[in-house]
Image (cartoon, grey):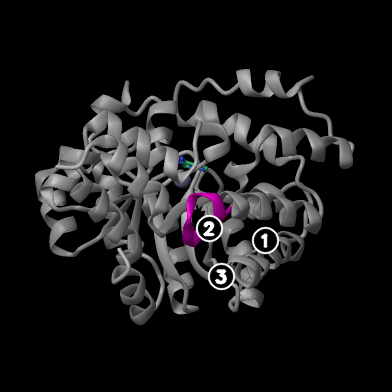
């Protein structure tokens, strides 16, 4: 039986993969302040401390309002490069060797920023990450589910020029009241174009949204999915089909999905044999990057070394890496 110091050491040292990270959610207050000055964009905060103290959320929507406001400082390709590069430096510190990054083009194109500006900035930083640190990555483009399907079709069309950079499409933003069926045709078109699909489901929304993401949107992974335990048949299906659930513990606490980390259902999901792993979601807003998420969760739920090992194995098994690369990382754990 290993003690918790040994487990924390293991977490810090072991190579890891992250599968649920919104690049706009890695915008630290310091960079937000710097970019607001560089681009002469007003933000409703006078200091970094004021930004940090605004990060008290009561649910997903209360967070999204601040998160979209923060994204307004991102204007140029250099801004998107700097944002992504700062996250990569954190990956390097945390020994994340592979990351699959979400971006929300509509939160920028709706402000007049060109699609090419966004994707090229992110992509250049990821290429540098590979050449400098050997970190590999994939880009997943998320549609904002509070918008209409028609506006999402416009974005899908623009993404077709960047198939070499974008591996898949996802669905994020305000979940309740924006069910998966709203985007059935969009996801069908995306699949026809060769994109893999994922979707945020069962973060705040009901288990039906997880069912519909599987059946209508044909997703390969569910982002969050923590509400699945309310539906026994759904749990059986997720296990049988080996569907990964990209769980984000600190995010769930900050957005009041669970009242405290000790009451998070990750350990129950793990014990049932669901393919779960730990991710940071929007680390600049939720109080920690991947290792902090893993360490805090380990302490709160009393996870064993074996539990942590399974979480890390699942992070590679569930990635969109090719099988031989997956196996090569798995052999090192
Ligand atoms: N966009 C950024 N973070 C999100 C989350 N946790 N849920 C839904 N949309 C998001
Ligand atoms: Zn998310």
Instruction: Give the residue at mark 1.
Output: 122
Instruction: Give me the C-alpha separation between circle 1 and circle 2.
Output: 9 Å
Would residue 213 be found to the left or right of residue 148 on screen? left
Q: Earlier in the sequence, mark 1 or mark 2?
A: 2
| Label 2: element kind | strand
Q: Which residues are magenta?
A: 92-103
Image quarter of the N terminus? top left
Instruction: Give me the C-alpha separation between circle 3 and circle 2.
Output: 16 Å
x and y, in percent, of residue 92 in the image: 56, 55
Q: Is residue 295 magenta?
A: no
| Label 1: element kind | helix
Q: Earlier in the sequence, mark 1 or mark 3?
A: 1
Query: Where 158 sits versus 13, above or below?
Result: below
- Asked whether the viewer can see residue 203, the reply is no
- The reply to whether callout 1 and callout 3 are in contact (CB within 8 Å) is no
Instruction: Give the residue at mark 3.
Output: 134
- The reply to whether callout 1 and callout 2 are in contact (CB within 8 Å) is yes
Q: Is mark 2 within 8 Å of ligand 2?
A: no
Q: Residue at x 25, y 60 (%)?
A: 243
């Amino acid at each position: 039986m290993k003690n918790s110091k040994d487990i924390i050491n293991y977490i810090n040292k072991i190579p890891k993969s992250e599968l649920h990270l919104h690049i706009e959610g890695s915008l630290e207050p310091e960079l937000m302040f710097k970019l607001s000055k560089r681009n002469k964009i007003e933000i409703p905060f006078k200091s970094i401390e004021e930004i940090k103290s605004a990060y008290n959320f009561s649910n997903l929507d209360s967070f999204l309002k601040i998160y979209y406001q923060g994204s307004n400082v991102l204007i140029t390709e250099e801004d998107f490069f700097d944002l992504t590069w700062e996250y990569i430096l954190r990956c390097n510190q945390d020994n994340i060797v592979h990351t699959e990054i979400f971006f929300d083009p509509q939160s920028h194109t709706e402000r007049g920023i060109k699609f090419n500006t966004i994707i090229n900035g992110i992509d250049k930083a990821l290429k540098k990450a590979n050449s400098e640190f050997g970190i590999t990555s994939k880009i997943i483009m998320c549609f904002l589910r509070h918008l209409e399907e028609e506006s999402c079709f416009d974005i899908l069309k623009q993404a077709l020029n960047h198939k070499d950079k974008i591996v898949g499409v996802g669905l994020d933003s305000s979940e309740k009241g924006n069910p998966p069926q709203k985007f059935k045709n969009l996801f069908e078109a995306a699949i026809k174009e060769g994109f893999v699909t994922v979707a945020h489901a069962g973060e705040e929304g009901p288990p039906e949204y997880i069912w519909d993401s599987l059946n209508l949107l044909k997703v390969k992974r569910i982002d969050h999915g923590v509400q699945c335990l309310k539906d026994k048949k759904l749990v059986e299906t997720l296990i049988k089909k080996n569907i990964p659930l990209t769980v984000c513990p600190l995010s769930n606490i900050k957005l009041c999905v669970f009242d405290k980390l000790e009451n998070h259902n990750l350990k129950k999901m793990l014990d049932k044999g669901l393919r779960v792993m730990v991710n940071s979601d929007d680390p600049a807003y939720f109080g920690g990057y991947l290792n902090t998420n893993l360490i805090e969760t380990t302490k709160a739920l009393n996870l064993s070394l074996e539990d942590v090992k399974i979480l890390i194995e699942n992070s590679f098994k569930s990635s969109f890496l090719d099988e031989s690369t997956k196996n090569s990382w798995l052999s090192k754990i």
